Amino acid sequence: MRCFNAIAFFFLLLCFNGFPFAARSQHLIKPLISDFMQPVEAPKLSGYIGEKLDEAYKNRILAQDADRLVKPFLSRTETSCWQTEFWGKWITSAILAYRYKPTAELKSVLDKTIADLIATQTADGYIGNYAPDKHLQQWDIWGRKYCMLGLISYYDLTKNSLALEAAAKIADHLINELAGKKALIIKMGNHRGMAASSVLEPITQLYVRTGNKKYLDFAEEIVHEWERPDGPQLISKSVTAVGKRFPRPVHEWYGWEQGQKAYEMMSCYEGLLELYRITGNELYKTAVENTWQSIYDTEMNIAGSGSAAECWFAGKAYQTMSINHYQETCVTATWIKLSQQLLRLTGNSKYADAIEQTYYNALLGSMFADGSDWAKYSPLAGERLKGEQQCGMGLNCCEASGPRGLFTLPLTAVMKSVAGISINFFVPGSYSIKTPGIQNIIIEQSTDYPISGKIVITTKLSKPEKFILRIRKPGWSQQSSVTVNAELVAIPDSAGFISINRLWKDGDTVLVSLDMRGRLYKSGAHNEYFALTRGPLVLAHDMRLGITGTDQPLIPVLTKDGFVDLKSIESNSKNYWVEVEASFIAESHAESGQKIIHVLLCDYSSAGKTFDPNSRFRVWMPWLIDSAVLP
């Protein structure tokens, strides 16, 4: 039975909206560990990335029928599916989009859908669509998690008490239901309890926002259960490669036995980082860092994603091969979110490097050109494939997840810290920030990066102030230079951030020059395949560019210092972000020697974007073996 009339409740919500209430308007618990960096106030992105954000805003966020996402909550008969995740995924991405670009149109949609969802809450606090005798099973708790995340995100945006209270009631009902049934959360649902216990993230957020210690106790209980012999052992197994933690499932690939499920595993670690911030327990942080490094070292492919059939499988070594259900977009987006958490927390540039690799390649590669849809799986060779709808909802999990990764970038491209400002990603636009001296400053980036490696950064502030401006030096950029008002700045040899500590004035100009030479990567059991990159972009051959050369083994022509000889192409085509021409040595049966051919390549994210066999593409190409130079 619904507790409130939706129309009346919507009126109540609007009355509260935007007005802080005394006891809960601010976080009541101050985390022991503060993030190294914080988001800026008002980012305005332009250029290619700005266009993609605008397209997804219009064609995915605003185009979503939010009423359809709420409808499943009105019928509590489900036994196995995951309809309830779609509302939570959509609204968390929509709130990120609103923070980036606040419009009255989107705000009205957010207000209404929050009211509609809360109006479905039962007297005991349940929001979901599972039949009473199927509570806690399959994806029930997973869906409750997404509802709480959406409600808490809305509370953080508006400071509306009704949203926070609704999230707390969901949590209370879950805690009581588990206790009443004497049930362990790790035995509920799928994937060794990882799906259900990923509820750790909103539970920790509730503790910070309400000060109610029962949420902290529940969070610690979840982590304690992880380490049981029948649990996912996410802390003790953090030193084990993620694809090797448990035996392959015997009975059901997507059932409880599956301990390598990539998306759910990373979701749990997002919650563990939140718990680390609260408690300061270094064991939690170390477990996340160890796991992140394991994923990066053993799973992430050249495009910055991985997983097969949605699970880790030591896939980095197999990336030159044809892989079934490869590179799930849910995995791609969650990897960005986990890396973003670690970047915020630590300020370590390796996390920014990883985000850029994934965002510019795997994530944008899975997004339809107009931002209206997202591929569920994305190969490194073949054709782009459209996903199918799930659970009768008109969309699938990846279509809902893609924007959650996409709209993280505006809030992390430029960030602030206690000591100053950090430029993490080179996206043209204007970024409004508070300096350490609490004055407004606007950081402007002018660039066509990654078409070129030239970035102009300009400061706009009312009075001079001394602070540190950190500029990321990507790990792939071997030749880099930075000048401030035409004076050269010393750059460390290792990858990281270039820290410039000076008295900054209005109109100061920083020029960054990055190394955009083509780079060669080889892989395969005998290094029999190669791929090319330029800056952060993976290059691919697309049939629309012509088929010359790609049907035979090749050797890239290298410069004398070992880089790939690439020529930028100015194209009138709107099909590609970047086009280059590469020279290759092709096999020749003539005694006179091998021949040089020229092949057009594009960025991987643009390749195959017709989603049909007429634009098949490939990243990894066969290497022409020369026995004379074999070891």
Image: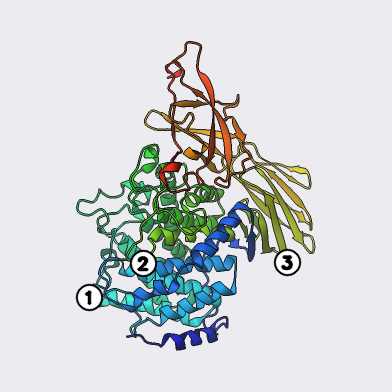
Residue that label 3 marks: 439
Q: Please report whichever mark, 3 or 1, sits nearer to the chain's N-terminal start.
A: 1
Q: Residue at x 46, y 20 (%)?
A: 587
| Position in image of residue 492 (x %, y %) | 64, 41
Q: Amino acid at mark 2?
A: Met
The quadrant of the picture occupied by the N terminus is bottom left
Q: Residue at x 40, y 45 (%)?
A: 299
Marks 2,1: beta carbons within 8 A: no
Residue placed furthest toward the top: 591
* Residue 356 image offset from top left, x and y in percent: 54, 49
* Residue 278 appears in the rendering: no
Mark 2 touching mark 3, by CB under 8 A? no
* Residue receiving disc 1: 133
Mark 3: which secondary structure?
loop
Residue mark closest to the camera, 3 vs 1: 1
Q: Amino acid at mark 3?
A: Gln
The furthest residue to the left: 251
Label 1: how many residues lie within 10 Å, few (<14), some (14-19) or many (20+)? few
**Relative vertical location of residue 9 with respect to residue 498 in this rendering, above or below:** below
SS category of the residue bearing label 1: helix
Q: Front-most of 349 and 92? A: 92
Foreground: 454 or 545? Answer: 545
> Which one is in front, 537 or 596?
596
Q: Quadrant of residue 462?
A: bottom right
Residue type at the position of mark 1: Asp
In percent of the image, x 46 and y 89: which residue is there? 8
Q: CA distance from mark 2 to mark 3?
A: 47 Å
Q: Which numbered disc, 2 or 3, marks the residue closer to the eye?
A: 2
Circle nearer the N terminus (2, 1): 1
Q: What residue is disc 2 on?
A: 393
x, y percent for residue 368: 48, 54
